[in-house]
Image (cartoon, rainbow, N blue to C red):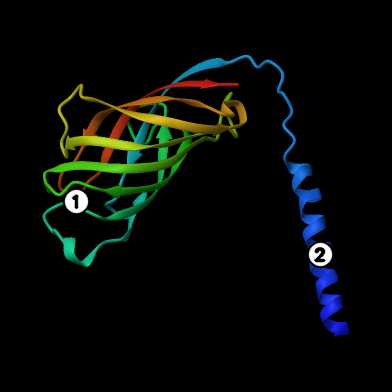
Amino acid sequence: MEKQMIFAWAMIFCLAVAPVYGQYYSKTIKAGPRVEKMTRLRFFYHDIPSGKNPTTFLIAQANITQDFFSPSPYGSLYSMDDSLTLEPERTSKMVGNAQGLYLALSRDPTKFTAVFYADFAFTIGKFKGSSFSLFSRYPLTDFVPSPGVIREMAIVGGTGAFRMATGFALFRATSSNAKTGDASLEVDVTLYHY
């Protein structure tokens, strides 16, 4: 009986303490006015799944969707650590990298579409240590896209100079290879941040 009483009092104590701690975290403080900034960036993004030093790796693929004629079979999950450069050539000055995942979604082996999550981080210059996050669908396109075709993706967050960023990124292929999946893209970014 004594053990039951101790247990009952312990339960009452725990239930009485929980709301007190819960109230501490429920206070809302009105933030002061913030000044929104707009930043535009232009750089080149290089996604290289082939060769001796690939920047993109296949990490998972469904057994039922093995299509050996497609560089990115339906349902394939890739990890990436792609370089960002100032010029279209992969050997030009590197300004950062894009790290993340993408899931290939096209059932047509001649087309490419994917859902991307990537963090674009800058390692030099004015925005060194800052990054923005992209989480969006890459629209359906040919593996060898026509010059001038622009694809838009959403920016959903950021750190450092791009804290709380929103905006969009416009991707335009500068080179691509349908057999290897290698691609270089020009990226024009518009960020709204604080």
Helix, strand or loop status at disc 1: loop
**61, above or below 96, in the image:** below
**4, above or below 157, in the image:** below
> Along the horizontal axis of the image, is 146 left or right of 21?
left
Residue 163's x, y, as percent?
59, 29
Q: Residue furthest bottom?
A: 1
Residue picked out by circle 1: 71
Residue 157's x, y, as percent?
51, 33
Q: Quadrant of the C terminus?
A: top right
> Along the horizontal axis of the image, is 25 left or right of 69?
right
Q: Residue furthest front?
A: 1
Tally of numbered discs: 2
Amino acid residing under circle 2: Ile
Which of pointers 2 and 1 indicates the residue nearer the eye? 2
Q: Quadrant of the N terminus?
A: bottom right
Residue picked out by circle 2: 12
Residue found 60% across the figure and 26% down from its top: 161
> Along the horizontal axis of the image, is 42 left or right of 69?
right
Residue 126's x, y, as percent?
59, 23
Residue found 31% across the figure and 49% down from its top: 103
Along the line of sight, which residue is nearer the eye, 163 or 144? 163
**178, above or below 141, in the image:** below
Helix, strand or loop status at disc 2: helix
